[in-house]
Image (cartoon, helix red, strand yellow):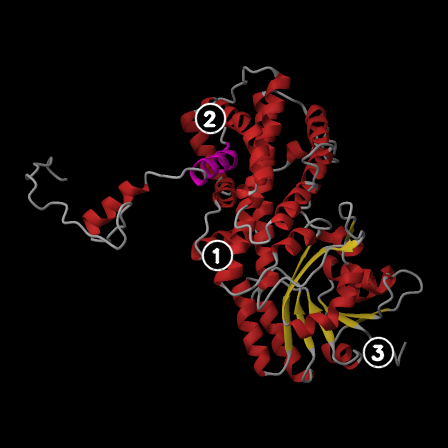
Amino acid sequence: MADTLYDFGMIGLGVMGSNLLLNMADHGFKVIGYDKNPDKTNTLESSATKGTIVKGVNTLPEMIAQLQKPRKLMMLVPAGNPVDSVIAELIPLLEEGDIIIDGGNSHYIDTLKRIGFLKEKKLHFMGIGISGGEQGARLGPSIMPGGDIEAYKEVEPILKAVAAKVNLPAGQAGDQPCVAYLGNDAAGHYVKMVHNGIEYALMQLISECYDVLHNGLGLDNDELHKVFAAWNNGEMKSFLLEITADIFLKKDDKSDNSLVDMILDKAGAKGTGKWTSEAALDLPEPIPTIDMAVMMRNISALKEERIQANNLYHPELKRINVLKKDLIQQLHDALLFATIVSYAQGLAMLSKASTELKMDIPLPEVIRVWSGGCIIRSALLNLFGKAFQKNPQLQNLLLDEEIAKLLKSKQENLTSIVTTALSNDYPVSGLSASLNYFNAYCREKLPTNLIQAQRDYFGSHTYERIDLPGIFHTDWQQDEKTVDHPSGY
């Protein structure tokens, strides 16, 4: 293979980078990977399917010299400074028209800066979100590219070949690859960021159901497996429910317990959930279920403080006095309702960002790309896709008639679960946030008129009226009697 010119290069041969490269090779592409660690390049070559063309090298110049022009290469390295360091190494080695792809979970703001910087160098740069974990990278991930359209056209055949494939509903062509051009500038990383925010929300909601089922109803792990497996066989079928059911069957190899019972209740985070909340505040667009999921991970990190608080307040894990089958059905409906609301919040955020940030994100395509390979893939996406087929300009899923009909049928059970859980001291912040968002979003008139009056009273911030156009301000204390306030007020 000494004279071989390779179709695609990968920088960073961790599990994700190696698996994605091997996936490309399985689809007939000649691939080359770079990593400083010789063990990783040797593992890459030894893991290749017989008959495929895969090479590992330990210097960047060696890889660059063996890539077909325009060179197409992807970085799968940690977000932040490592990305900029690799770019700095690449610039002297590349030529005008070459394509650099960041396939990691970079902040979209950083991606915007890199696009502008490399454009001046006459190099193409794309941010691509990739979801599906290690197995997805090897067998077919969901791929979310955005930005440089010329660069996308060059790499499109490779991305379509390696992406997950899904069969679409009757009347549409089947076996569609879960990849599409998703908009301008940093749209790829923006869509992946929101994907991860929705992922945070769904995981939090499932964990709240687990808490009520396990501690409130007393279900053991075998029973929990059966409940989540049953839910996954119905209208909520999803990757996260599937793996949740599997988790309860896994035994610990260091004890006689189930593994889930031996795992510390302290969640990790890599920042994408926080970025989603920050970006939503900047738009602004309300995503309280996602926000609460981020906050609950932060609370979980306060393990030592929670131990102290537990010893101070002595909370009880109360058994919930509701028939088992009734509570399980209520939880099913509550989870279904809150899951839809979580997607609705994320997609509404993408809708607004598409306009406000001029990204032109095609939401029907986003839903299609998420329908296979990714962590948040779900049967519910078919329902969401139909909503956007009827109305491509739909601002929020809650405004679709079919979805409204479904939510109305589940609302009472969500309300019952939130009421029951809170009255028995179970924190169901994600379920509560979903219900509160729904109740507020569906109200024609909120008590915010009082907030506007307060703002105008203390800060002359003005307000609008319901009967006249324009902006108004009132001197609230004019001609009013003086009120004696208690000392120190």
Q: Earlier in the sequence, mark 3 or mark 1?
A: 3
Say the numbered circle drawn on residue 422. Answer: 2
Q: Is residue 478 visible?
A: yes
Q: Main secondary structure of the magenta part?
A: helix
Residue 474 is situated, as x and y percent measured from the top left of the image, at 17, 49
Neighbourhood count class around disc 3 (C-alpha, 10 Å): few under 14, some 14–19, many 20 upward: some
> What residue did someone put label 3 on?
5
Specify the segment rendered in magenta: 428-441
Left or right: 310 with respect to 5? left
What kind of element bears circle 1? Answer: helix
Magenta segment includes 2: no
Identify residue type, mark 1: Ala
The nearer-to-camera label among 1 and 2 is 1
Amino acid type at mark 3: Leu
Q: Nearer the viewer, residue 13 or 21?
A: 21
Q: CA distance from mark 1 to mark 2?
A: 30 Å
